[in-house]
Amino acid sequence: MKFSYAFPAGLLAASILFAGCGNDNNSNNNGNHSGNEAAATAGTATNAPAAAAAAPSADFTSAIEQYRAYVIEQCDEFVKQTEAFTNAVKTGRLEDAKALYAPARMHYERIEPIAEALGDLDPNIDARENDVDPAEWRGFHKIEQALWQNSTTDGMAEVADQLLKDAQLLRAKVETVDIDESLLVTGAVELLNEVSSSKVTGEEERYSHTDLYDFVANVEGAQKIYELLKPELTKKDPSLAQTIGERFDALLAELAPFKSGDGYVSYEKLKEDEVRKLSQNLDALAEPLSNMGTILGV
């Protein structure tokens, strides 16, 4: 549940040389010398703007517009699936509620940096027990505890209603939330930090053990941002762009065997060496991804 992601522009300086004239006996040589200096100076002056034009500042307009569209799309699905989940909770359909829980959360986990930029929405939707004051605890994980630890939906109707209202409020706010290139870069890094701090450790879904759903969704959300920024990143550092892409592929390939039907196996089924390998692939991706902002000058 927690996240939030600077670059220098090069300066060109042209020096102007001034040559004084000598005595009459050396006038020809000095004249030639001054001419050469003038030519050199002119060349430097004309080359400076050309060099500056060769390295224009990055344009993130398209990436930002596409990311907003992606966020809205994910929010639409999030509200739709959260409504189905909360209806199951309110009507006492325990097994249906369990089946709908993790898939609904994936849409939220892909865009969590946006929720975190909107005040209390993230803790209201996604706080774990002890993350907030017990009297204020609500959202997915409160219902998760009831479904898996207590094996009941009793007493969760009001929590379910509030969760759906919070999901709808998130959807309404993403229309106008301020999204810039800095949020994109930091968002991608934070999504991976989220995985390493709570998903790979199994702490996020402590009752349902559906951590792999969250793990995959966080990685997919970070990958989406990378793909939107890749054209500009490739212009500046094609090697870094390639490395990040390859490491996303490696991490997702490592996650693929844990798929089960339309979902993922319980995190409890992973062996210690499998968790370690996932963690290593995650670290291998996080390092180059953290350099993306510097290269892009965000």
Image (cartoon, helix red, strand yellow):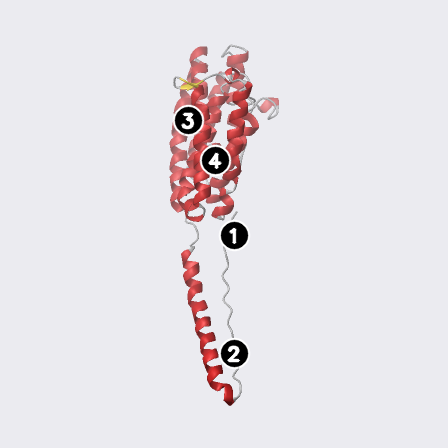
**For marks 3 and 1 on the same chain, the one whose residue lies earlier in the sequence:** 1
- Residue at the spot 51% in from the left edge and 69% down from the top edge: 15
Q: In whole angstroms, how far apart are the C-alphas of marks 1 and 2?
A: 35 Å
Q: What residue type is labelled 1?
A: Pro
Q: In this view, does 283 lie above or below 47?
A: above
Labels 3, 2: front one: 2
Q: Which element is circle 1 on?
A: loop
- Residue at the spot 49% in from the left edge and 42% down from the top edge: 292
Q: What residue type is labelled 2?
A: Ala
Task: Name the foreground residue: 76 vs 42.
Answer: 42
Q: Are marks 1 and 2 in contact (CB under 8 Å)?
A: no
Task: Name the foreground residue: 179 vs 277.
Answer: 277
Residue tagged by mark 2? 19
Labels 4, 1: front one: 1
Q: In whole angstroms, how far apart are the C-alphas of marks 4 and 2?
A: 60 Å
Task: Name the foreground residue: 110 vs 11.
Answer: 11
**For marks 4 and 2 on the same chain, the one whose residue lies earlier in the sequence:** 2
**For marks 4 and 1 on the same chain, the one whose residue lies earlier in the sequence:** 1
Q: Label for residue 8?
A: 1
Q: In whole angstroms, how far apart are the C-alphas of marks 4 and 1?
A: 26 Å
Q: In whole angstroms, how far apart are the C-alphas of marks 3 and 2?
A: 72 Å
Relative image position of residue 147 (x, y in whole percent):
50, 13
Residue tagged by mark 4? 114
Q: In whole angstroms, how far apart are the C-alphas of marks 3 and 4?
A: 13 Å
- Residue 122 appears in the rendering: no
Relative image position of residue 249 (x, y in whole percent):
43, 31
Q: Is residue 168 left or right of residue 149?
A: left
Q: Which amino acid does label 3 sit on?
A: Phe
Q: Label for residue 78?
A: 3
